[in-house]
Amino acid sequence: MDLKEAIKLLDYHQRWRQGIEEDFKYKPSQLTEAIDIVLEQVKKLNIDVFSIQLLCGICDKETEHEQISSTELKCLECGNISVE
């Protein structure tokens, strides 16, 4: 499966999940393969999707913060963990 086919499958899966398509016509293994292919390409973009710029309450600098849980952020400058 190439990237174009993987995106097409994921788009179909999303429409099926939303009730727009009645039957899911792909095998679970094909869905897994499509997810793997798209994730591989996204990772090549080298974007840090888990960090954001925030003012740290400890080091008092606007620094990158990494999301470490659904409610906690870690300052990449001083290591402070704060709750959203």
Image (cartoon, rainbow, N blue to C red):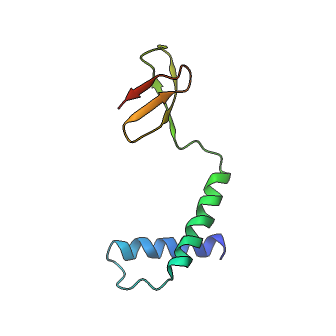
* Left or right of 83 on screen, residue 37: right
- Asked if 8 appears above or below 54 in the picture, the reply is below
* Left or right of 28 on screen, residue 84: left
- Asked if 59 appears above or below 40 in the picture, the reply is above
Q: Position of residue 58 (x, y in %)?
A: 45, 14
Quadrant location, the N terminus: bottom right
Task: Determine the residue positioned at 59% across, 59% down.
Answer: 39
* Left or right of 68 on screen, residue 70: left
Q: Position of residue 68 (x, y in %)?
A: 47, 38
Task: Determine the residue positioned at 61% across, 55% down.
Answer: 42
Q: Position of residue 79 (x, y in %)?
A: 52, 23
Task: Determine the residue positioned at 60% across, 65% down.
Answer: 36
* Left or right of 70 on screen, residue 3: right
Q: Position of residue 72 (x, y in %)?
A: 40, 34
Q: Nearer the viewer, residue 9 or 83?
A: 83
Quadrant location, the C terminus: top left
Q: Nearer the viewer, residue 7 or 26?
A: 26
Count of numbered marks:
0
Tell me where residue 3 sits by quadrant. Answer: bottom right
